Image (spheres, rainbow, N blue to C red):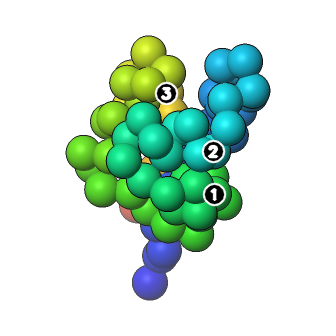
Amino acid sequence: MPTESLTNEVRLLRFLAQDMTQAELGRRVGLTRQTIAAIEQCRYSPSLEVAFQIADVFGKRLDEVFHWNPAGVETAKRVSTP
């Protein structure tokens, strides 16, 4: 069974935002610094609402910050193609 993977650009965007700290981003979206660190390391997936809030802090669309990469999708497409 394929597993899904949610990746993100949060760390990069913090760096590009004049080295915004994890604590500052957390304060702006109502999370702890530890939760922001876990999101950046893909150990925790934020709620949809929080994901939108994070994207908004950086002035980005949701899909510019978070990426869903389902495992095995390309393989499944090749197999089912005649």
Q: Amino acid at mark 1?
A: Ala
Q: Is residue 10 left or right of residue 79?
A: right
**In whole angstroms, how far apart are the C-alphas of marks 1 and 3?**
19 Å
Q: Nearer the viewer, mark 1 or mark 3?
A: 1
Q: Are marks 3 and 2 in contact (CB under 8 Å)?
A: no
Which comes before the other along the chain, label 2 or label 1?
A: 2
Label 3 packing within 10 angstroms: few (<14), some (14-19), many (20+): few
Coordinates of residue 50 in the picture (x, y in percent):
32, 46
In whole angstroms, how far apart are the C-alphas of marks 2 and 1? 7 Å
Instruction: Tell whether label 3 touches label 1 (CB within 8 Å).
Output: no
Identify whether 51 is placed above or below 13: below
Say what secondary structure mark 3 lies in.
helix
Q: Residue at x 44, y 15 (%)?
A: 59
Look at label 3 and name its amino acid.
Glu
Return the residue at label 3: 64
Which is nearer the N-term, disc 3 or disc 2?
A: 2
Q: Is residue 82 visible?
A: no
Q: Secondary structure at mark 2?
A: helix
Residue wearing tag 2: 22
x 44%, y 84%: residue? 1
